[in-house]
Amino acid sequence: MNGPDLGPDELAAEHEALLSFMYLSPVGIVRSDLAGNVDMMNPMAAQLLMPLAQGGELANIFETLAPVAPELRRLVAEFTRERGPVCENRRLYVNPARHHPAVLSCSIIRIGAGFLMTVLTDISRQVAAERQVRQTESWLAGIYTSVHDFAFFTLDAQERVETWHPSIERLTGFQADDIVGRPLDIFYAPGEACPGRLAEHVALARDDGWHIEECWCATRSGERFWGQILVSVLHEDGDAPSGYSVVIRDASQRKVTSDNLERLLTTDHLTGASNRAHFFQVAEAEFTRARRHRRPLSLVMLDADHFKRINDTAGHTAGDEVLQQIVREAKRTLRAADLIGRLGGEEFALLLPATTRQEAAAIAERLRAAIEQLPIETGGQVLHATVSLGVAALDESEAELDDLLAAADRALYEAKRAGRNCVRVEDVVKSEQGATESTKGDGEARPPSPSAGEAQ
């Protein structure tokens, strides 16, 4: 509060200090009237609110937050005191976008007869940590209630099995001579040990102290079971881990229930591919892992050729069968760690972790050839479909996931331009001037793509 005897210079200095505090504050601060009309907002608040802004407008705090917290205007209207907190640390779940928070904490304080102060904080990491704690508690509770369904042992500093315990034989059938001195992925089922997977699991455990991985495991006799593998770090003096403790749990029964629910939430009901939302959620996670561990990552865009013609001539049922067969063939061609998602209509995307540009191009060509030769029986007739595919891969530049998607999309466009039923690869190279030059898979320069009208 300003004292009654402060002179103009002192008032100006105090006002300047208040403005500096607002603009340098690590939390978002918004001042508005009771109707929500904003008259002051610091940069952090603008940054946190921008994902919710309609057309970039942040003029009214209630309208901006309406998609995630429509009740705020009512809470303010029902608050009868002249001063005090209207709400405190209310969690707002924002639809996550790249570089933006997923969860905000919102507090609204009435600071006078006609003003509100809204304080916003990004608590995404805190919420993620809480979720991880709940997962751990649930996981440990499962161990306590299913003591016959887990095995525990240790790894040495080189990440190889160091000790053996009878619980290992009970769960997996492995004897000490089978596993001591071997890497942890000896428990993985065939097809699960993709390049870099085990190293990433251990790296995440080092970063956070522990990490849980879920995958198909196999017993000594080859029987598969769905396993949860907890790796936690053991420390001696110094920063380097002295070894790791490991718990493997058979979670096959839980997986049956969770798979049914996950299938409903993440799968395109027509084709069996991942739906768009789930595909991009997985893509974001894989992109982060690839960047963090400097691992290759490729993406392939796939489009059914002349699909409208198939629908118009053979009917929509035939069109549906074509899409379903494309997905079935893709699943037969891809590895367990790969993912196919339906982005919309006849357009699909393939996510290929730990896959180089050349490997992705070979996979795309193998899939293209398989679909071309596939007889599709529907309605008493046999159809043949073809697809066009565009390939892009992470390089050493500071590209983002959106850049990878855009490059694969441009490659798909080039495949269609080239007559369809082919594969094209896009390699984006940023020049010193910041311009983007595209090259074909063989490194030969090509001119910029024409407009959409020219392509038709």
Image (spheres, rainbow, N blue to C red):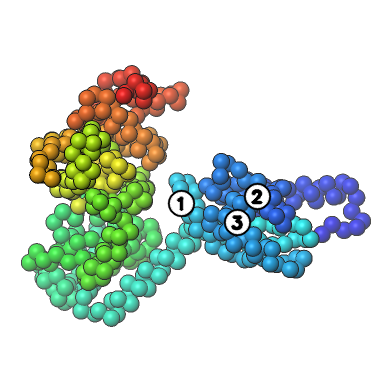
Q: Helix or strand or loop: what does disc 2 sit on?
A: loop
Decide: few, some or many residues near mark 3? Use Cα within 10 Å; few <14, some 14-19, many ≥20: many
Residue 118 vs 312, above or below: the answer is below
| Horizontal relation, residue 339 to residue 181: left or right | right
Image coordinates of residue 355 in percent, x first then y, are: 24, 42
Q: Are marks 2 and 3 in contact (CB under 8 Å)?
A: no
User: Which of disc 3 and disc 2 is earlier in sequence?
Assistant: 2
Pick the quarter of the image with the N terminus.
Answer: bottom right
The residue depicted at 34 percent of the width and 57 percent of the height is 204
> Residue 60 shows which numbered tag?
2
Residue 158 vs 13, above or below: the answer is below
Image coordinates of residue 90 in percent, x first then y, are: 57, 64
User: Which of disc 1 and disc 2 is earlier in sequence?
Assistant: 2
Question: Label 3, label 1: how many angstroms apart (C-alpha)?
Answer: 16 Å
Q: Helix or strand or loop: what does disc 3 sit on?
A: strand
Frontmost residue, 383 versus 87: 383
- Residue 264 shows in the view: yes
Frontmost residue, 385 versus 1: 385
Residue 363 vs 238, above or below: the answer is above
Decide: few, some or many residues near mark 1? Use Cα within 10 Å; few <14, some 14-19, many ≥20: few
The residue depicted at 26 percent of the width and 20 percent of the height is 444
Residue that numbered label 1 is attached to = 96
Q: Are marks 3 and 1 in contact (CB under 8 Å)?
A: no
Q: Residue furthest right?
A: 5
Question: Label 2, label 1: how many angstroms apart (C-alpha)?
Answer: 21 Å
> Residue 120 shows which numbered tag?
3
The amino acid beneath tag 1 is Pro
Q: Are marks 2 and 1 in contact (CB under 8 Å)?
A: no
